[in-house]
Image (cartoon, grey):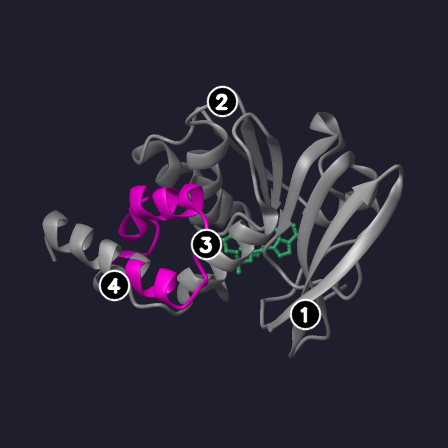
């Protein structure tokens, strides 16, 4: 498929997700229109880049479906200039979508942690090739512990499923900040939207979803 065809496919899927109400804001719409998802999926799946479903990225992991990226980004509500922590870099696609919002009109930054070193390297290459590496730092490690080196964060997004909200992530969230995280068992989870206000957390339980497990000290143990 050529570049022009990918552009058309991208516009088509964004229009579709907008019609379904998954894309609500201009900033999320613009970000999804700008990031070339075909650059974040492995070569054998390139032609399926704009089919709205998760795709394999190796090591038993997936790049999330486009509607899930839209839903989570809308729920997170990142703003230009925000410092964002992502747990579960995978392909780097979600990080690039966040970078479009926090770095384009501001001096924000995205710190993204991936536990599988080969995937962290894959994401770094994808982000470098597509021009997002100045805005996104990929760290290899256990993101269930967060990344205290750069804390506190305005926004935290977890793109793997946790049995509970990891305590270090609550601690590393700024007062006035927001976290979006899927919480539940291995087969079904609910998206939690967590706001921290005056040191207290308020949890809104949103839609049901299905993510690969968050494996680590404050996640699943296997
Ligand atoms: N956001 C990704 C993207 O845009 O391609 C998709 C994320 S994929 C659904 C979940 C990722 O979380 C996998 O790459 C997995 O290896 C990673 N992961 C699982 N547990 C982790 C942990 N404790 N720390 C960091 N990454 C973790």
Which is nearer the N-term, disc 1 or disc 2? Answer: 2
Residue marked by disc 3: 24
Q: Is mark 1 within 8 Å of ligand 1?
A: no
Q: Nearer the viewer, mark 2 or mark 3?
A: 3
Cα distance in 3D space between marks 2 and 3: 21 Å
Q: Position of residue 62 (x, y in %)?
A: 46, 63
Cα distance in 3D space between marks 3 and 1: 20 Å
Query: From the image, which quarter does the C terminus lie in?
Result: bottom right
Which element carries disc 2, helix, strand or loop?
A: loop
Q: Position of residue 58 (x, y in %)?
A: 43, 61
Query: With 149 as the anchor, is 101 left or right in this view?
Result: left
Q: Is mark 2 within 8 Å of ligand 1?
A: no
Q: Which residues are magenta?
A: 15-44
Tell me the chief SS of the magenta region: helix
Crowding at mark 3 (Cα within 10 Å: few <14, some 14-19, many 20+):
some
Which is nearer the N-term, disc 1 or disc 4? Answer: 4
117 or 32, nearer to the observer: 32
Residue marked by disc 2: 106
Which element carries disc 1, helix, strand or loop?
A: strand
Q: Is mark 3 within 8 Å of ligand 1?
A: no
Residue marked by disc 1: 190
Which is nearer the N-term, disc 2 or disc 4? Answer: 4
Task: State yes or no: discs 3 and 1 in contact (Cβ < 8 Å).
Answer: no
Asked whether 163 falls inside the magenta stretch, the response is no
- Tell me the tag on residue 44: 4
């Amino acid at each position: 498929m050529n570049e022009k065809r990918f552009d058309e496919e991208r516009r088509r899927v964004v229009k579709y997700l907008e019609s379904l109400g998954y894309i609500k804001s201009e900033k999320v719409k613009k970000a999804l229109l700008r990031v070339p998802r075909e650059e974040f999926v492995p070569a054998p799946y390139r032609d399926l880049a704009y089919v709205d479903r998760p795709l394999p990225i190796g090591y038993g992991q997936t790049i999330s479906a486009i509607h899930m990226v839209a839903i989570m980004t809308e729920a997170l509500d990142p703003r230009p200039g925000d410092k964002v922590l992502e747990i579960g870099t995978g392909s780097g696609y979600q990080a690039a979508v966040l970078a479009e919002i926090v770095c384009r009109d501001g001096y924000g930054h995205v710190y993204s942690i991936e536990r599988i070193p080969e995937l962290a390297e894959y994401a770094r290459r994808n982000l470098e090739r597509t021009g997002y590496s100045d805005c996104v730092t990929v760290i290899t490690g256990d993101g269930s512990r967060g990344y205290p080196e750069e804390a506190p964060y305005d926004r935290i997004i977890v793109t793997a499923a946790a049995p509970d909200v990891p305590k270090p992530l609550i601690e590393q969230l700024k007062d006035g900040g927001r976290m979006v995280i899927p919480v539940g068992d291995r087969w079904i989870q609910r998206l939690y939207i967590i706001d921290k206000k005056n040191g207290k957390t308020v949890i809104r339980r949103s839609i049901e979803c299905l993510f690969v497990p968050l494996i680590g000290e404050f996640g699943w143990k296997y």
